[in-house]
Amino acid sequence: MTAPLVFEGVPLGGRGSQPVTLEIPARATVALLGDEDSGIGRLGGYALGLDPPPAGRALVFGTEISRLPERERLAFRRRVGYLPAGDALLQNLSLRDNVALPLRFGSAATTREIEGRVNVMLAAVRVAAVGGSRPARANEEECRRAAFARAMAFDPALLILEQPFDGLTARTAAELLEFARGGESAEGARRAILITGQELPGLLLPRIERVYRVSRAGAVELETV
Amino acid sequence: MLLSGILSFLVISQAVRELGRIGATDLIGTLIVVVIVRELGPLITALAIAGRSGTAIASELATNRVMGEVRALEAMGIDPRQYLVLPRLGACLVSVFVLLVVFDVVAVVAGFAAASFNGMTGARYAEIVLQSLSARDVWLTVAKALAFGLIVGLVPSWFGLSVRRASTEIPVAASRATVTAIVGIFLCAALFG
């Protein structure tokens, strides 16, 4: 079975970094940690074809998104959930509309179906009460919760999360990771997840199958969890 | 409305007075149709919208870019041009056209007021204005409104989305967008001429 996400010889671009070859297996949560200047923040963009990698390739479900024609590239990205660093919620939309946005533009669902799905997602991340607020009126945790819900609007098999737990308590982070994993089975989580960031709360480690760290020398090393 | 009313009132007052001396008051029909309705109407309307909305469009889209919202849209499989640019372009086309109609109506009414003030009857004013107005004038005015609307919608959008990461680029993009849109409107008006 093809791994949902594979990086083959992709340079991180950080100081002295070496090309990264990394595989995110299905149903597994993998964390890649490193300093801010290590370049790990670029991997999400490479995977989604937002930026072409300077060398090597990033394969999502066996496909190099950056090589697809524009229309197909946009459509393909809907198969991947993406939480960018800083949430990037649209400031002129309410939290509810932010979650509904990808469904309105990228699905054939009716308004009623979209509303139903959004209600479920907002309730699952516990922001239903503030769903009508714009991001500027909500606190950081509520915005992050809504951004998680937006990333999972299409119920993707692969999630890419950039610094998803920064500024959150360990308990909230653990709750959101459970939500992102989508439940457990004998084979693991419901979806594959790549987490990039600088550090992870210890409470999350039991739920993360592999943790890699970019060393000061720029090499990616597997840490024992 | 104020701009249009004052402009038309001043031009027609002067024209009725000066043209009356040489017995050529019929020419005020041509003056109001060609100069105000066909030429200045679209131009001033487009300039006003470029100044007001062009700046807003450029700075809003530039902010979207800097805040990472454009990238997030792309990552969600939404074309930012479809989501961010197309509605603004449509709004510019509609608003330039609608405001142009308002501008021209106010200009003609203000012209009537100015002509009456200077001793011309309403019937005479209406007669010479309608005589001067041809289908070509109407189509040219509509075509200009659409062309100017395109410029006001597209140029600021392009400058706004061209910003990269720094928030200091936002005011630069806004001012460049407005200046370029204004120059574009004048060049386009010259092409129509």
Image (cartoon, helix red, strand yellow):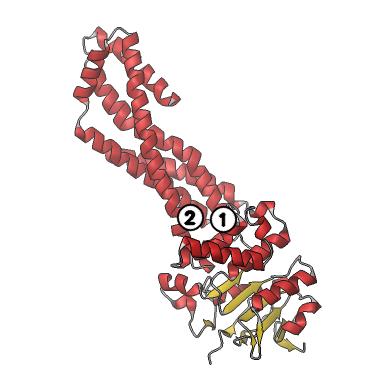
Query: Going by the image, does A215 lie left or right of A13?
Result: right
Residue A78 drawn at (x, y percent): 50, 72
Dot 1, crowdedness within 10 Å: few (<14), some or many (≥20)?
many
Query: Going by the image, does B117 lie left or right of B182?
Result: left
Chain name for mark 1: B
- Going by the numbered disc 2, the residue's amino acid type is Leu
* Quarter where residue A187 is shown: bottom right
Q: Is residue B79 visible?
A: no
Q: Are marks 1 and 2 on the same chain?
A: yes
Which residue carries the number 1 mark?
B64
Q: Residue furthest bottom?
A: A1
- Going by the numbered disc 1, the residue's amino acid type is Asn
Residues at discs 1 and 2 in contact (Cβ within 8 Å): yes
Query: Going by the image, does B144 lie left or right of A12?
Result: left
Residue B1 drawn at (x, y percent): 43, 26
Please tell me which of labels 1 and 2 falls first in the chain. 1
Which residue carries the number 2 mark?
B84
* Quarter where residue B103 is shown: top left
Q: Residue at x 41, y 73 (%)?
A: A69
